[in-house]
């Protein structure tokens, strides 16, 4: 069934409203990352967006719980980043897939600076994915 003009406008307004409520501006990504509980083997996932405050990713075939402390490894340009953070939300998108939001607790300050520069209006965007 096709959405009506009003439904499409509401969906757009809902997305804009969510962006305005967010604490950190996000940069869309679509890269393979790894994550794991501390001292556990890495699992693969696909990142959806990243900010100076955290990362959102999609994980398949593993249950992730609120409050879990995870190590995430991802790329910012040609730099490999390892950060740790706490799961602040997790949503089942289907029976085997979860979308997960991590709030960073430890991340290199130089990486935070790179992310901030990528979000500055009027600057050339920094390539987050090679």
Image (cartoon, rainbow, N blue to C red):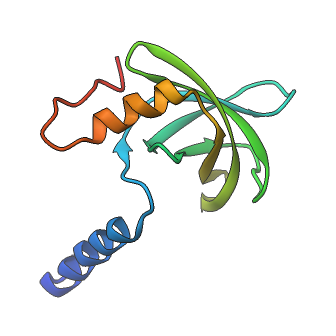
- Image quadrant in which the N terminus is located: bottom left
- The residue furthest top is 78
Q: Residue at x 77, y 50 (%)?
A: 63
Mark count:
0
Q: Residue at x 77, y 56 (%)?
A: 65
Image height of 130 relative to 3, above or below: above
Q: Is residue 23 left or right of residue 88?
A: left
Asked if residue 1 shows in the view, the reply is no
Q: Is residue 67 left or right of residue 109?
A: right
Q: Is residue 115 left or right of residue 71?
A: left
Please provide percent x and percent y for residue 2.
Answer: 21, 76
Task: Tell which of 84 and 62 is nearer to you.
Answer: 84
Q: Residue at x 54, y 46 (%)?
A: 54
Q: Is residue 78 left or right of residue 124?
A: right
Task: Tell which of 66 and 64 is nearer to you.
Answer: 66
- Image quadrant in which the C terminus is located: top left
The quadrant in which residue 118 appears is top left
Please provide percent x and percent y for residue 24.
Answer: 42, 55
Q: Residue at x 27, y 70 (%)?
A: 16
Task: Tell which of 52 and 70 is nearer to you.
Answer: 52
Task: Tell which of 59 and 13 is nearer to you.
Answer: 13
Please provide percent x and percent y for residue 33.
Answer: 56, 28
Image height of 9 relative to 116, above or below: below
């Amino acid at each position: 069934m096709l959405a009506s003009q009003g439904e499409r406008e509401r969906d757009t307004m809902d997305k804009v409203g969510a962006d305005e409520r967010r604490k950190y501006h996000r940069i869309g990504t679509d890269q393979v990352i790894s994550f794991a509980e501390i001292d556990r083997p890495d699992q693969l996932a696909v990142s959806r967006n990243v900010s100076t405050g955290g990362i959102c990713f999609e994980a398949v075939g593993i249950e992730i719980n609120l409050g879990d402390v995870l190590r995430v490894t991802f790329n910012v340009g040609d730099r490999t980043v390892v950060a740790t953070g706490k799961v602040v939300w997790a949503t089942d998108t289907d029976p085997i897939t979860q979308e997960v939001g991590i709030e960073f607790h430890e991340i290199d300050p130089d990486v935070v600076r790179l992310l901030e520069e990528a979000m500055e209006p009027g600057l050339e965007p920094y390539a987050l994915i090679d």
